[in-house]
Image (cartoon, rainbow, N blue to C red):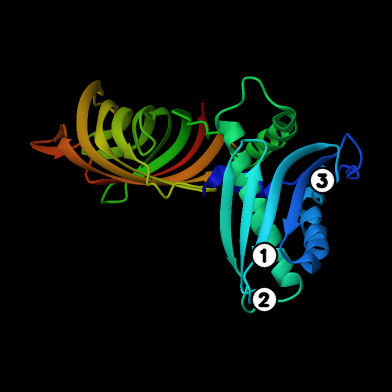
């Protein structure tokens, strides 16, 4: 009968202490206790009452109460008093439960506490059945115990955590090539998580590039980027920090503008570059829905356009590219 639900019921105590009724009142809700050792009854009843009174349940001797009996508990000690057999006949679920409690080395309060805990655990194990199979026509005893069980379950069984499947983000980014030529810009992105650990990310943005020196002037290279990546969120994702690894493809639509020297003509043109890209992001959860993070990435060329420089061709962008981004994500 061990498990989280019986344990939850066993550990459940109301915060406020409800006044218990004496055994001779009809309104009393009680557990009947008998022991084979007459001297044990009073101190054990006091210890068990301390455990049960927070649920407005008292402990009474046999045949002394006119209230509602919830369970009958019998303690049988062996001849050497080294072991006790705890027998519970439960009036709530009509179950019979037993447990052997080893007592050697225990004396005084420790012995009483061990027996009281064993009784309380057996009662909790039996009463937890009401949470699994509520009675269609409850008895008076079941009407008393059912609210205790329901509150125990509500406090100790957490509702399932809502899985957030969609992240919307804005990013400020900068990247450099191997010659430390920098481009800066911003982008917006969306992350979709069909699985807790696996996701997809689509991102689009604008990068403002440097001027490339040419014999007859300069060429300005800006880019509209579109990236699609597969994401992996490690199972260790918890608490305030959230690591995410990504790999995918990126395409840049490059816009070239010519700035010629005097008496030379300038022109504008479009070109396309393609990359394979890997990223690593470490996010910090600022609130339940807001996450900020720093992301590092590297991109290798799959296709790079070239620009005619006199009689030779030269790449418009020198790869590989290394990027750094500051991002803010809102989880839906």
Q: Residue at x 20, y 32 (%)?
A: 274
Q: Residue at x 63, y 37 (%)?
A: 153
Question: Mark 2 or mark 3, which has the lower sequence index?
Answer: 3
Left or right of 205 on screen, residue 256: left
Q: Which residue is mark 1?
A: 114
Judged by depth in the image, the label closer to the viewer, 2 or 3, is 3
Q: Are marks 1 and 2 in contact (CB under 8 Å)?
A: yes
Q: Quadrant of residue 271?
A: top left
Label 2 – label 3 distance at C-alpha: 31 Å
Q: Is residue 47 left or right of residue 309?
A: right
Number of the label disc, if any, that sits on residue 106: 2
Q: Is residue 261 visible?
A: no
2, above or below 277, in the image: below
**Is the residue 304 above or below the residue 43 in the image?**
above
Residue position for label 3: 63
Residue furthest out toward the bottom: 105
Query: On residue 146, which mark appears?
Result: none
């Amino acid at each position: 009968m061990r498990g989280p639900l019986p344990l939850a019921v066993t550990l459940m105590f109301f915060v406020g202490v409800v006044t218990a009724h004496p055994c001779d009142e009809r309104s009393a809700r009680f557990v009947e206790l008998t022991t084979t050792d007459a001297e044990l009854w009073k101190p054990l009843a006091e210890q068990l009452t301390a455990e049960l009174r927070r649920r407005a349940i008292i402990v009474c001797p046999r045949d002394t109460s006119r209230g509602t009996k919830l369970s009958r508990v019998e303690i049988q000690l062996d001849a050497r008093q080294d072991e006790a057999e705890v027998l519970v006949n439960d009036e709530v679920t009509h179950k019979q439960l037993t447990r052997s409690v080893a007592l050697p080395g225990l004396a005084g309060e420790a012995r009483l506490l061990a027996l009281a805990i064993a009784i309380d655990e057996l009662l909790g194990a039996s009463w937890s059945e009401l949470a699994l199979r509520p009675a269609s026509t409850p008895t008076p005893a079941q009407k008393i115990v059912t609210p205790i069980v329901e509150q125990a379950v509500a406090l100790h069984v957490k509702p399932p955590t809502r899985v957030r499947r969609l992240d919307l983000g804005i990013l400020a980014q900068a990247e450099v090539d191997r010659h430390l030529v920098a481009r800066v810009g911003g982008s917006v992105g969306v992350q979709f998580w069909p699985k807790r650990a696996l996701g997809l990310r689509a991102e689009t943005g604008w990068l403002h590039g440097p001027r490339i020196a040419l014999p007859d002037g300069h060429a300005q290279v800006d880019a509209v980027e579109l990236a699609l990546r597969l994401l992996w969120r490690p199972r260790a994702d918890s608490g305030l920090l959230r690591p995410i690894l990504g790999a995918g493809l990126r395409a840049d639509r490059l816009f070239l503008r010519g700035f010629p020297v005097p008496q030379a003509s300038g022109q504008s043109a479009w070109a396309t570059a393609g990359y394979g890209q890997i990223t690593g992001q470490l996010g910090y959860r600022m609130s339940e829905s807001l996450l900020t993070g720093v992301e590092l990435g590297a991109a290798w060329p799959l296709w790079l356009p070239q620009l005619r420089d006199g009689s030779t061709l030269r790449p418009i962008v020198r790869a590989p590219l290394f990027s750094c981004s500051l991002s803010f994500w809102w989880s839906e």
